[in-house]
Amino acid sequence: MNLNKKNILGLSLLEALVSTAIIGIGFVAILQMTNYSVQSMQTSGERTKANFMTNLVAEDVIGSRKSSTDSHSNFSNYLMANQFNADVCSATTGSGSADTGKIYGTTEENTHAMKMRKWQALLNNKNYLRCKGTSETRNFRVYKICRFPVSGCLQNTSIQDEELYIGRVQINLNEGRKRKYLYFQSDYKVLGKNKD
């Protein structure tokens, strides 16, 4: 009777060590899973911000397409001559543009320069969209496609307009491995008619 009670009094040291090791492995797995989920949420947030920024640029271009300056007949022509490149991610130090926070510039600037300053303040800055590596890019290009041969214009006889402007916003994320593109029609000139 006394012998049976002695065998069931408690855990041995070996059993306690094994159970501690099993619980420790479980905690390590939970911590790794938590770390992965936090990184996943940050990546998802950056992609959402990139989507917002590309749409913002497209809306700015389409909303200002009829504005003109002394040297450019429309905003798309201005953008062809003044291409936008954000080089904040290629710099290993610094936060980016000196225009940070100066989205609207001064009242002396024309609409086109103010839009470019806004993009510089938002896209050429690590505070709004983070950089994970130096191979990430943020740029905007406008391509002009013409039905007839014109200097500085890509010719395509299958388009229905005399001139067609295509905008392309590109944002590379995750050290350049994830690319966000947005192509859109930024302006046009109807064949045989003056543009409204």
Image (cartoon, rainbow, N blue to C red):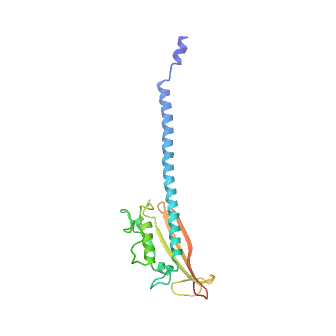
Residue 77 vs residue 148: left or right? left
User: Which residue sits at x=53%, y=83%?
Assistant: 153
In the displayed structure, 14 sits above or below 78; it is above
Residue 134 visible in the picture: yes
Q: Nearer the viewer, residue 16 or 128?
A: 128
Which residue appears farthest toward the front when viewing the image?
Answer: 107
Point 49% across, 65% down: residue: 172
Nearer to the camera, 121 or 85: 121
x%, y% of residue 58? 53, 71
In what quadrant of the picture does the N terminus appear?
A: top right
Q: Position of residue 89 (x, y in %)?
A: 42, 64
Q: Is residue 13 above or below residue 100?
A: above
Residues 159 and 117: in front is 117
Image vertical order of residue 62 relative to residue 42, above or below: below
- In front of the other: 188 or 20: 188
* Residue 86 shows in the view: no
Q: Quadrant of the C terminus?
A: bottom right
